[in-house]
Amino acid sequence: MGIELKEITQKYGDLIAVNNANLFIEDGEMISLLGPSGCGKTTLLKTIAGLLPLHQGSILSNEKDISNLPPQARNAAMVFQNYALFPHMTVAENVAYGLKINKCALSLIKKKVEEILDIVELPGLNQRKISELSGGQQQRVALARALVIEPAMLLFDEPLSNLDQNLRVSMRRMIRKIQQEYRITSIYVTHDQEEAMSISDRIVVMKDGVIQQIGLPGEVYLNPRNRFVAEFMGTANLLELNEDDEIIQLLECGKWASSRDNCPGGESNNRQKRYLMFRPEDVEVGAEGNFEGTVIWHETIGSVTRVSIDFAGNEIIAEIRNYYKSGINCTIGEKIRFNIDLAGDGHIVPD
Amino acid sequence: MQYSRNMALLKNKIIWKERGNKSPLSFDVLIDRIMLFLVVGSLLLFILYPIFMVISTSVYRHGVFSLDNYRDLLSPVNLKLIKNSLFVSTLSSVLGTFLALCIALYTFLQKERIGALIYRLLMTTLISPPFVSALALIMLFGRRGLITYNLLGLSVNPYGWQGIVLLQTLGLISLAAIMLISALNAIDKRLLLASRDLGASALQTLHRVILPSIYPAILSVLFLLFTINMADFGTPIIIGGKFKVLATEAYMTIFSAADLGKAAAMSVLLIPPAIIAFYFYRKNLEKNNSLADGVKALGGEGLDFRLPLFIRIALGTITGLFFFLMLLKYGNIFLSAVTINVSGKLTFTWKHIEAFQFAYLPAVYRSLSMAVIAGILASVIGILLSYYTHRRQLPLMKPIEFIASLPYIIPGIFFGLGYIVGFNNHPLLLTGTTAILVLNCTFRHISVGNKAANAAFENLDRRLEMAARDLGASPVRILTTVIFPLLKSTFLLSFINTFTACMTTVGAIIFLVSPRNVVASVLMFKDITNGHYGLGAVVASVLIIVTVAVNLVAIKYLGREGGKPYVA
C-alpha cells in the first residue's frame, strides 16, 4: 500500500509539532523517520496511524483519502516503544487480540497465532505471561501482535530503544527480514541514525517539526542538505566558510569549490553561514599527508581511534583504523600529518 | 530462520468482516454516550441536588427567604454547643494525630515483616462498627464496668467530655496511622541514607528529614480527624451525658423537633472545617492511595537507623497499648454478645443471640445487600468518572468530578439530611425505600474509587489503549478488555472501602431508615442508646464477622495477582 502525506501540519495547542510535511512512501518500502526527541516524528507516525486527529493536510493511501478514517479502518498496525502489551493477558491472548476484536473464527485465530509466533521465533510460549518474558521476547510478541492482523502497513514507534545493544542489532535484522519477505509498507520512527541507516530503504530526517531531508541512507549520510542533517547522521567535520572561502584555499581544494554553487541556499545568500563538510573517515592520517596539524585529543574505541587535530584554528576529527597496529603515534600536543579525501560533491552545506 | 515458509501469513487469509466501515454512530458509540449520560446525570441528581436542597432549606423559613435559622444559631445556647464541639474535636484530633504519628513511626522503624504485620492489624481495626468502642468503654469501665466495678470495686462515671475525647481519639487512630505510614513510605530512603552519611544521628534525621517530609501529611490528618470528630453525633449521644455538641443537637433537632431548617443551618456550619480538611488532603495526600501494599519498613532497607532507647520504648509502649485496647474492645464485644452480668457475675447466655435471631436477620441481610450493591456501583461509577475526566478528557468533567468528591468531605449528617429533603416528594419519592439507602451509600463513596482510579490511570500507559484502538477495538471494547481488567486492584480498593463503610455507617443513613428498611448498624445504634448492650454487642459481632468475610472473599476473587496497575 503506497502512502502519500500532503501538507500535513499538526499542533498541540500553540506548539507546531509537524509543519507542512510532504512525503510519498511506496508500496512495500520501509522508511525511517529520524530525528531528536521532540522533532515531530512520533506525532507524524500517530497521525498516519489515525491515533491523532489530523489538524491540516491529507493522507492518501493508494490515492484514496484516508485522513478521517478511524485507526481500525486504516489497515495499519503499530509496534510501540515499550511494547504496550496487555499485562493481564498471555502471549497468545495478546497476539490474538486484534483477531478477536475483528471477529475471526476461533480455529483460525489459533492457527494464525501459532504461525506468527513461529515467524518471530517464539514457538511454544503461547501460555506465558507477559511479565515472564525478557525485553527481546516482549518486543517479538508486540511484532507478532501487529503482524498477525495482516496489516497493509506497519508502524514502528522506536521499537528497539528499550533493548540493549546486542539485542537491538539482532531484532532490527529480524524486523527488516520479515518486512522484506512480506513486502509490508513500513514506517519506522527512531532517533538512532545507525538503526535508521541499517533498516530502511529511505530516511526522512526531521527537526522541529520540519522535514529536513528525504533520501537513501547513503545520500543522507554523504550529501546532507544542511548542517543539522550532517551532524545528526554521524560525526561530521564542519569548517565554517568565510567570504573568501579561506579554508578552501588553505586545503588547496579549489577543484570542488564550484560545488558551492550547488549548495542549497549557498549561491545567492552570502549572509547564511556555510560549512565545508566531510566525515572523519575522509581524513587520512599518515606521514605522507599534505597537511600538518596538532593533536588536541584522541580516544580509541576498539576498531577505531578518533583524533582531534587543530588545523589553522579549526578542529578536524580524523579516524584511524586499527590504530594499535598502524604505527601512527598520536600524542597530545605533537604534530600530525593528514590528507582529506574530498571526492564527490555535497561537501558544502548551509547552516 | 523459517522465513522460507512461503508467505505463511497468506496461508490462512482472513476475510475481514467490513473492517472499518462502521458508521460514526455505531452501537458501541451509543453505549459510550449512554454510560457518560448515566454517570453525569446520576452525580448531578444524587449529589448536587441534595446538597443544594440542604442549603436552600437552611435559608427558607415558612417559604420565605430568611437567615433566621443562622441567627438562631448565635443564641447563647447554640454558641455553647459550637464551643463544646470545637473543644472536644480539637482535643481528640490533636491527641489522635499525635498517637497515630507515634504508631506510624514505630511501624516505619521496624523490620519489614513486623512492620507489615502492624500495618495489617491497623487495617483490620478499620473494620469496626461505630460506637462499639463506646459500648466497650461503658461495659468495661462504666458504673457497673467489668474492670472498674467487678475487678477494682470502683464506680466510675465515664460520661462527659473526657469520654468523648477518649473514644474519638481511639476511634480514628487506625485511619490516621495508616495515612501517616503511607506518607512515611513515600519518603525517598536515599535521603535518610544521605543524612546518616553526612553525620546526622537517627534522632537528628528524624527531626530534620523525616518529620519535615511528612509535615503536610500530618496537617492533612489533623484536619481530617477534626472534620470527622466535628460531625460525629453518635459518640456524644452515647457517652456525652449532659455534655452536648453541635452535631448531636442537629441530629436531635431532626428527630424530635423535626425542624429541618434549623438542622440544615446547623449542618451547614459543619462544612467549613470539612472544606479546609479537604483542601489539605487534596494538596498532600491524594496520591498516597495504596491498598495494603504493605510497609516498606526501614528495617528492610538494611539501613542502620536506631533512635535512642527511651524513644523506642515510648513508641513501642504506645503502639502496644493501642493494640491492647483494641484487643480489649473486640474481646469485650464478642464476650458481651454471649454473657450476662448477674449481680457482678458473668454468666453465659443465649438470650441476646435469640433476641437477635428473630428480629435482626432481615436487617443484616439488607445491610449486606445494600453494602455490596453500593460497593459495586460506587466503584464502577468512580472508575468511569475518572476515565471520562482524565483519560478521555471530555470538557466539563472536572467540575463534575469535584461534585463527586463533595459527599466524601461533607459530614454524613448533612448528606443524609439532603436525601430527606430532596427525595420526599413525587416524582422523586424515595423515602422509606431500600433504594434511598443504596443510593446514599453509593454516592457518598464515589470519591474513593475515583481518586484511586485517577492514580491508577496515571500509571497506566496510554499506549495500551492506543494499541487496542490500533488493533480495531472500540471505546467500549477497550474499557471491557483492557481498562477494567487492569484496574481490578483499583476496583478492589474502592469496593472494600465502600462496602466496609456502608456496613458500619450510621451517620448518613440514620434519617433515611424506617421500620420497613432498617439496617443492622442503625438497629445496633438504637440498641446501644437504649441500653440494650448485649443485643448491640451481638449485632456488632455479626457486622464485624460479615464484613471481614466479604473482604476476604473479595480479596480472594479479585486477588492481587495481575490486578496491579501496569507501570510502563
Image: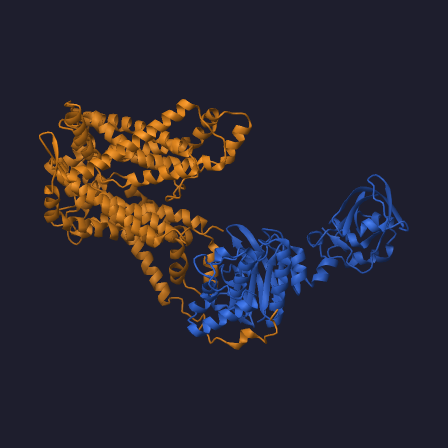
Closer to the camera in the image, B67 or B122: B122
| Colour that chain B carries in the picture | orange
* Above or below for A99 versus A324: below
Closer to the camera in the image, B56 or A321: A321
Relative image position of residue B328 (x, y in whole percent): 24, 33
> Can you see residue B420?
no
Q: Residue furthest left?
A: B343
How many numbered marks does the figure carry? Answer: 0
> Can you see residue A272?
yes
| Colour that chain A carries in the picture | blue
Relative image position of residue A86 (x, y in whole percent): 46, 58
* Above or below for A93 versus B252: below
Whether residue A180 sits left or right of residue B479 in the image: it is: right
* Above or below for B302 versus A139: above
Closer to the camera in the image, A340 or B376: B376
Q: Please give the name of the residue rendered at 40% of the width and 22% of the height, measured from the top-left corner.
A: B310
Q: Please give the name of the residue rendered at 22% of the width and 40% of the height, measured from the top-left corner.
A: B129
Relative image position of residue B533 (x, y in whole percent): 14, 36
Whether residue B485 sits left or right of residue A149 in the image: it is: left
> Which image quadrant is residue B158 in?
top left
Relative image position of residue A47 (x, y in whole percent): 53, 60
Closer to the camera in the image, B555 or A342: B555
* Above or below for B338 versus B213: below
Whether residue A275 sits left or right of residue B364 in the image: it is: right
Q: Quadrant of the N terminus of chain B?
A: bottom right
Q: How is the image coloured?
A: by chain
